[in-house]
């Protein structure tokens, strides 16, 4: 208990020192530490979970990206080979047609005229359907 002194220095009364206040403060500090520790542990657990989730997502992304790169390489290689083959075939067909036309000029003109006539009939017939 503390003594209370008036301004003139005379002792007035004795007040309780507040043992209840000290005890309540200690309980409050203890609860505060417990809550802070719980919050810190919860934050650490959440942070660890987020890190694990991010690592898992990164690994899956890398797997998908690698698969996509492999597929792209496969498709690009197939397209390149196909283009080379088609280009080569087109060159061969062009050479063969040129040789045939040189060897058979009369037949070539008649075939070209026949194809032109057929195309003309088809175009004309297609146009006639629209007029009706």
Image (tube, grey):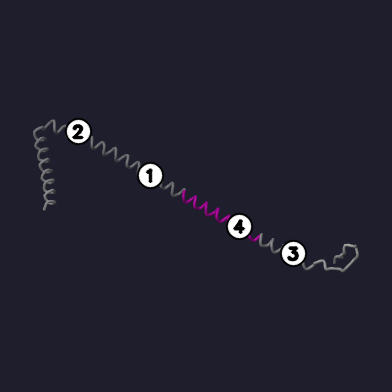
The mark lying in front, picked from 3 and 1, is 3
Q: Is residue 92 above or below residue 13?
A: above
Q: Name the residue beneath numbered marker 1.
A: 72
Q: Residue at x 8, y 33 (%)?
A: 106
User: Which tag is nearer the camera, tag 3 or tag 4?
Assistant: 3
Judging depth in this view, the residue of 20 and 103 nearest the camera is: 20
Mark closer to the chain start, 2 or 1:
1
Is tag 3's residue or tag 1's residue first in the polypeptide sequence? 3
Q: Nearer the viewer, residue 3 or 18?
A: 3
**Disc nearest the viewer among 2 and 3:** 3
Name the residue: 38% across, 46% down: 71
Instruction: Name the quarter where the N terminus is drawn.
Output: bottom right
Q: Which mark is residue 43?
A: 4
Which residue is found at the position 60% from the left and 57% from the top? 43
Which residue matches tag 2?
A: 95
- The kind of secondary structure element at disc 1 is helix
In the displayed structure, does residue 12 sit left or right of residue 29? right
Which residue position holds label 3? Answer: 25
């Amino acid at each position: 208990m503390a003594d209370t002194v008036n301004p003139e220095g005379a002792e007035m009364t004795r007040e309780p020192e507040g043992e209840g206040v000290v005890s309540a403060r200690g309980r409050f500090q203890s609860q505060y530490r417990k809550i802070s520790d719980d919050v810190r542990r919860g934050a650490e657990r959440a942070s660890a979970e987020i890190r694990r989730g991010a690592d898992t997502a990164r690994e899956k992304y890398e797997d998908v990206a690698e698969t996509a790169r492999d597929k792209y390489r496969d498709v690009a290689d197939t397209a390149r080979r196909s283009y080379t083959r088609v280009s080569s075939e087109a060159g061969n067909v062009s050479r063969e047609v040129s040789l045939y036309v040189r060897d058979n000029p009369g037949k070539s003109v008649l075939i070209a005229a026949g194809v032109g006539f057929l195309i003309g009939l088809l175009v004309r017939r297609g146009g006639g359907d629209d007029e009706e």
